[in-house]
Each structure stands twice: as C-alpha cells, then as structure tokens.
C-alpha cells in the first residue's frame, strides 16, 4: 500500500565484533568540534570531545513493536500491509535517524547497516506509485504526555503560527490540494480538520499539533529528524513524511492496551483515506 512505517531507534541487537573480528565499539556520547568552530566530527579518534556535539544514545523503547502492531492492525482492517523498516540494532551501535557520520562514528559494519536501512526505505518508496506517506515512529519522555507530530515545522514557528508549505515534510500533500501560498488551507493539514492530529483527537488521543493542542507553547517538542527530512516531500517527490513521537507511559502500556492500538490504527487510516 502507499504507507511506509519506519522505526529507527527500537532495536536490541548489540554486536560486540564485526565479521572480520574487529571490534564494534559503542557510539560515543560526544563528537568533536572541528577547529574552525563549525561542524562536528564523529569518530572515535577525533580528539577532544565537545558538549556542542552530543550524540543521543538511549533507545526509544517499544517503538519497533508499535510499528509492527500498527502494520498488523492496518492489514487486519484493509487486507493490505504497509511497508515496514526496522533498525534491529541498539541505538548505542547505530542511530539510523542521523546522517551516516553521526549515526555510525565511521565503524565499518555500522556504515553497512546504515546503508542497508536506508536502502530498504528507498525500495519501499520506489514501490509506491504516486502519492504516499511515511510515518517515522519514535518515543519521547517529557511532559505533557501526548503524541508529538513532526512536520519539520519548529515549535517556535508553531507557537507563532508562521510556517511555509515548502518547508514542511508534507509539501506534496499541500500542493496536491492546491494550498500553495494559502496559509489557512495548509494549516488544515497541520492542525485542522484534515490533520493527523485531528484524527488522533477523534479517537480520544492527545496530540500536538492538533485542533485541541495547536502548538507546544513552552513544552519541549520534536519537529522531525533525518528520516523525515530525507524521505519526506520537502526534498521533492510525492511521498510525505510525519514523525510520530509517542509518550513514555503510552508506549509502556501499548502491549496491554488493545484499545489504544486500535485507536492509533483508526486515526492513521482516517488520515490516509481522506487525504491520499
């Protein structure tokens, strides 16, 4: 079908050695600031590390299972299963939602795994004819507990109500419905009655942005990362992308709460059926 689910931070494999016998060290907590004071250098031998170059290490717990269950739930309703791409490695060995340098610290097998993960996403995109949607599944642990939906629009711009269709990861969706420079039209897909947040609200689930929570205000908010930037329609094409950040308690209770699983599936299908 025209839906892709990705889960870059839910793996649990922890290889200690490469096939050729060389070590596969953990990613460092920090990289090094280059001498010109600009970019970060991501290797285990870069020299003096810098807190300006922090690499996130913890997994997004339960997210691989959430992506799998969403796919299974959609198949149970529609008869079609979304494309699903998991990273099976711990984030401490590979961060599949970063560029290859920060993701791997240039460890050879990590580079291969990063390339494989991205190749699978590219294959899934190529299998879709016409418009489609990628949902990148993540987990967050801050308050308030609600699902954060990332469209590459910063929390600051959501708070101000100022953002551009061409800067978003659902650019193709807005263009298809001829929003163009009509900001009011495009807002319907971000926080209005055509948005994923709207359908989450309809299922009794909290989400931001959505009609109930149009902006994050002073709360921490994830607007989208590497996968959404690389594979969403801001970079071109007809495949849109949204980052879904599920709250910690929601993720912990996922396996025992079949009602929440059904609610998320129904929200995604309603959004997909209306807009695609």
Image: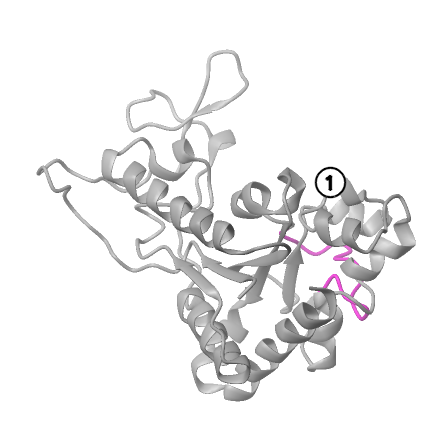
Residue 48, given in percent of the width and then of the height, sits at: 37, 22
Instruction: Please report the residue visible at 37 percent of the width from the left and 48 percent of the height from the top.
Output: 117
Instruction: Please report the residue visible at 29 percent of the width from the left and 29 percent of the height from the top.
Output: 44
Q: Residue furthest front?
A: 129
25 lies left or right of 67:
left
36 lies left or right of 42:
right
Position above or below: 47 against 71: above
Residue 26, given in percent of the width and then of the height, sits at: 27, 42
133 lies left or right of 214:
left
Residue 212 is inside the magenta segment: yes
Residue 44 is inside the magenta segment: no
Q: Nearer the viewer, residue 37 or 175?
A: 175
Position above or below: 39 against 67: above
Instruction: Please report the residue visible at 85 percent of the width from the left and 51 percent of the height from the top.
Output: 178
In this rendering, the count of numbered labels is 1
Q: Residue furthest left?
A: 21
Q: What residue is shown with label 1?
A: 167
Position above or below: 87 against 68: above
Q: Quadrant of residue 142?
A: bottom right
| Magenta range | 208-222
Look at the magenta stretch and give its main secondary structure.
Answer: loop
**Residue 140 visible, this angle:** no
Residue 5, given in percent of the width and then of the height, sits at: 49, 61
């Amino acid at each position: 079908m025209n839906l892709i689910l990705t889960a870059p931070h839910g793996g649990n494999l922890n290889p200690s050695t490469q096939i050729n016998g060389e070590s596969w060290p953990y990613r460092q907590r920090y990289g090094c600031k280059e001498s010109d004071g600009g970019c970060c250098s991501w290797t285990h031998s870069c020299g003096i590390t810098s807190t300006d170059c922090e690499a996130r290490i913890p997994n997004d717990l339960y997210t691989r299972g959430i992506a799998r269950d969403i796919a299974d739930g959609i198949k149970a309703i529609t008869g079609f299963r979304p494309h699903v791409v998991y990273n099976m490695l711990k984030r401490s060995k590979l961060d599949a939602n970063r560029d290859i340098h920060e993701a791997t610290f240039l460890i050879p097998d990590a580079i291969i795994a990063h390339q494989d993960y991205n190749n699978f996403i590219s294959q899934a995109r190529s299998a879709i004819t016409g418009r489609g949607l990628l949902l990148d599944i993540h987990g967050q642990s801050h308050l308030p507990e609600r699902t954060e939906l990332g469209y590459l629009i910063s929390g600051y711009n959501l708070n101000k109500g100022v953002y551009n269709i061409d800067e978003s990861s659902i650019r193709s969706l807005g263009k298809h419905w001829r929003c163009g420079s009509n900001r009011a039209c495009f807002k319907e897909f971000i926080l209005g009655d055509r948005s994923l947040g709207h359908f989450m609200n309809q299922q009794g689930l909290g989400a931001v942005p959505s009609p109930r929570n149009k902006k994050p205000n002073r709360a921490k908010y994830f607007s989208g990362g590497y996968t959404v930037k690389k594979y969403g329609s801001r970079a071109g094409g007809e495949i849109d992308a949204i980052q879904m950040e599920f709250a910690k308690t929601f993720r912990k209770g996922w396996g025992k709460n079949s009602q929440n699983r059904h609610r998320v599936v129904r929200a995604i299908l309603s959004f997909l059926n209306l807009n695609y």
